[in-house]
Image: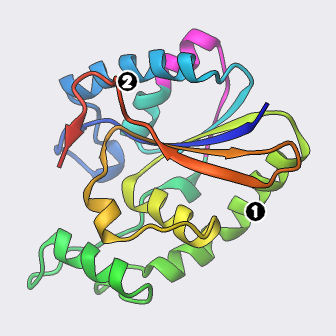
């Protein structure tokens, strides 16, 4: 049986309040319940759960961990990359430039390369634990960060085109054989109620 690491982008959230404190909106709450059912079908009975400390990420996985009585590990390394506003560019234009150039950053922000360097040790620790144990891993985080991890850590194809197609929530399932060799990645966001596309 293959071992699994699943990356989950949080559900749809209110735009009110500070970024870290934004909560799921009505659609996001329904999405989280639907996601719980999907994870049950995918078979995550023996999983370690890691999450961004942002409220919308925690709320997205909360129905699943409550049902299974699982512990959750909060990590600041799973926060979204900081993208400051720029008076001359929209947020999407900034993100497009960041995917085109891994060293590009808006004033006061961090480039993709810098952000990955900041979290690389944390990712190495998670993956070493994954290789040495039989636990699957669930990581609940944010859209840009999922792409950065897939691109820089797992060396998979991910760019602005892939980022634009991401939904809330979204699921990227990576499978590994018993010797921890990568088998494949499947994006699987089907059968989630009220899935949201930007």
- Left or right: where does residue 96 sit relative to residue 48? left
Q: Nearer the viewer, residue 106 or 45?
A: 45
Task: Verify whether residue 54 appears in magenta.
Answer: no
Residue placed under numbered mark 1 in the picture? 124
- Left or right: where does residue 93 sit relative to residue 190? left
- Left or right: where does residue 93 sit relative to residue 145? left
Q: Position of residue 176 (x, y in %)?
A: 74, 46
Q: Is residue 28 above or below residue 121?
A: above
Residue at 76% from the left image edge and 62% from the top image edge: 124
Residue situated furthest top in the rendering: 67
Residue placed under numbered mark 2 in the picture? 32
| Cα gap from disc 2 to disc 1, whole angstroms | 28 Å
Local packing at callout 2 (Cα closer than 10 Å; few below 14, some 14-19, many 20+) is many
Name the quadrant containing residue 31. top left
Which numbered tag is attached to residue 62?
Answer: none
Task: Verify whether residue 63 appears in magenta.
Answer: yes
Q: Nearer the viewer, residue 84 or 92?
A: 92
User: Which portion, as a residue range, is magenta?
Assistant: 62-74
Local packing at callout 1 (Cα closer than 10 Å; few below 14, some 14-19, many 20+) is few
Q: Position of residue 70 (x, y in %)?
A: 66, 20
Residue at 67% from the left image edge and 25% from the top image edge: 71
Name the quadrant containing residue 156. bottom right
The N terminus appears in which quarter of the rendering? Answer: top right
């Amino acid at each position: 049986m293959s071992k699994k690491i699943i990356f989950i982008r949080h559900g749809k959230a209110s735009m009110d309040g500070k970024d870290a404190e934004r909560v799921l909106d009505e659609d996001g709450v329904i999405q989280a319940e639907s996601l719980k059912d999907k994870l049950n079908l995918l078979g995550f009975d023996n999983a370690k759960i890691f999450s961004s400390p942002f409220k919308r990420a925690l709320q997205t996985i909360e129905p699943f961990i409550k049902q299974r009585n699982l512990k959750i590990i909060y990590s600041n390394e799973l926060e979204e990359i900081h993208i400051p506003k720029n008076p001359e560019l929209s947020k999407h234009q900034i993100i497009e430039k960041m995917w085109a150039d891994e060293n590009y950053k808006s004033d006061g922000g961090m480039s993709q390369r810098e952000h990955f360097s900041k979290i690389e040790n944390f990712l190495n620790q998670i993956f070493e634990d994954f290789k040495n144990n039989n636990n699957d891993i669930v990581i609940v985080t944010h859209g840009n960060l999922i792409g950065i991890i897939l691109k820089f850590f797992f060396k998979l194809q991910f760019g602005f085109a892939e980022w634009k197609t991401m939904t809330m929530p979204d699921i990227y399932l990576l499978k590994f054989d018993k010797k921890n060799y990568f088998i494949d990645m499947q994006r699987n966001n089907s059968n989630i109620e009220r899935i949201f596309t930007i």
